[in-house]
């Protein structure tokens, strides 16, 4: 699944294009380095996409029960946002953000989550993995060649966070109950534009609506 740049997403929506049923729109954009102005700008950008989707002049970002929603001209949208510093070729003066957006009904999705993680390996990666990752993920990381472990860790972490967002749960130490929750979630590793988000890994987590197969 491909991530498109924000301006391209706006242009495509203006033509009447929509992503297929069961798949959200994924849009990447530049942001401020500081989290607070970045958060405000990305929420506004997500609202702009939702408004363009339905041909409305504006949209509102809401957080009922901690679950983000966007409402545009009476249409309810699922939305998930991910933020990263240093998104432009590793320059830490810049930031990037990823938006996942889809109609809340009639599009085959019940919930979604998205996350970004930089390809860096913490010094205590094995302790972090022991606390937060499933045993199978920990074992795979331990077997990964050292030169590829940073990318593998970033992918595993982004998948974990995306799944937690889709399930609307906080980051917590791994326990067997999470296997049941995460087992109901479809995870995808979307393709990021390399020239824009060099050094990052992204993950998309989807909970499908009943009786609606995911698009292929």
Image (cartoon, helix red, strand yellow):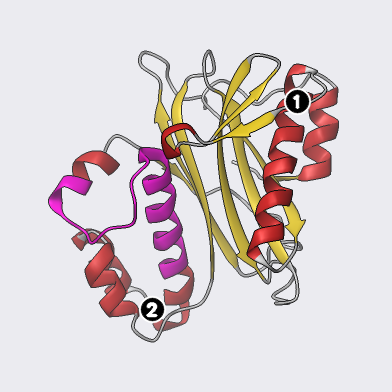
In the displayed structure image, the side of residue 29 where residue 106 appears, left or right: left
Secondary structure found at label 1? helix
Which tag, 2 or 1, sits closer to the chain's start?
A: 1
Quadrant (top left, top right, bottom left, bottom right) of the N terminus: top right
Q: Which is the main secondary structure of the residues drawn in magenta?
A: helix
Q: Give residue 145's mark.
A: 2
How many C-alpha atoms fall within 10 Å of the one at disc 1: few (<14), some, or many (≥20)? many
Q: Which residue is mark 1?
A: 51
Residue 11 location, quadrant: top right
| Residue ID at (58%, 25%) | 77
| Residue ID at (58%, 47%) | 81
| Residue ID at (63%, 16%) | 75
| Residue ID at (19%, 62%) | 135
The x, y position of residue 116, in whole percent, is 55, 58
State the residue lying farthest toward the left: 176
Q: Nearer the viewer, mark 2 or mark 1?
A: 1
Look at the image and give the residue range highlighted in magenta: 152-178
The x, y position of residue 91, in whole percent, is 73, 77
Residue 4 location, quadrant: top right
Asked if residue 176 lies in the magenta stretch, the reply is yes
- How many numbered badges does the structure rendering display? 2
**Disc 2 + disc 1, Cβ < 8 Å:** no
Q: Is residue 172 above or below residue 57?
A: below
How many C-alpha atoms fall within 10 Å of the one at disc 2: few (<14), some, or many (≥20)? few
The x, y position of residue 154, in whole percent, is 46, 66
CA distance separating discs 2 and 1:
46 Å
State the residue lying farthest toward the bottom: 123
Query: Toward the viewer: 182 or 168?
Result: 168
């Amino acid at each position: 699944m491909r991530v498109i740049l924000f301006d391209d997403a706006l242009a495509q929506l203006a033509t009447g294009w929509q992503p297929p049923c069961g798949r959200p729109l994924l849009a990447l954009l530049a942001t401020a380095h500081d989290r607070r102005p970045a958060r405000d700008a990305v929420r506004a950008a997500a609202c702009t996409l939702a408004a363009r989707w339905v041909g409305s002049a504006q949209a509102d970002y809401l957080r009922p029960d901690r679950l983000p929603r966007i409402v545009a001209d009476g249409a309810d949208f699922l939305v998930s946002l991910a933020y990263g510093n240093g998104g432009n070729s590793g320059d830490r003066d810049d930031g990037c953000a990823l938006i996942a957006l889809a109609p809340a009904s009639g599009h085959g999705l019940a919930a979604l989550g998205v996350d970004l993680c930089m390809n860096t390996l913490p010094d205590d990666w094995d302790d972090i993995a022991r606390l937060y990752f499933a045993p199978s993920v920990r074992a795979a990381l331990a077997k990964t060649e050292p030169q590829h472990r940073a990318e593998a860790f970033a992918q595993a972490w982004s998948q974990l966070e995306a799944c937690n967002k889709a399930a609307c749960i906080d980051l917590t130490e791994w326990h067997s109950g999470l296997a049941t929750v995460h087992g109901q979630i479809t995870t995808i590793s979307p393709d990021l534009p390399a020239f824009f988000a060099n050094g990052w890994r992204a993950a998309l987590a989807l909970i499908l609506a009943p009786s609606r197969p995911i698009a292929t």
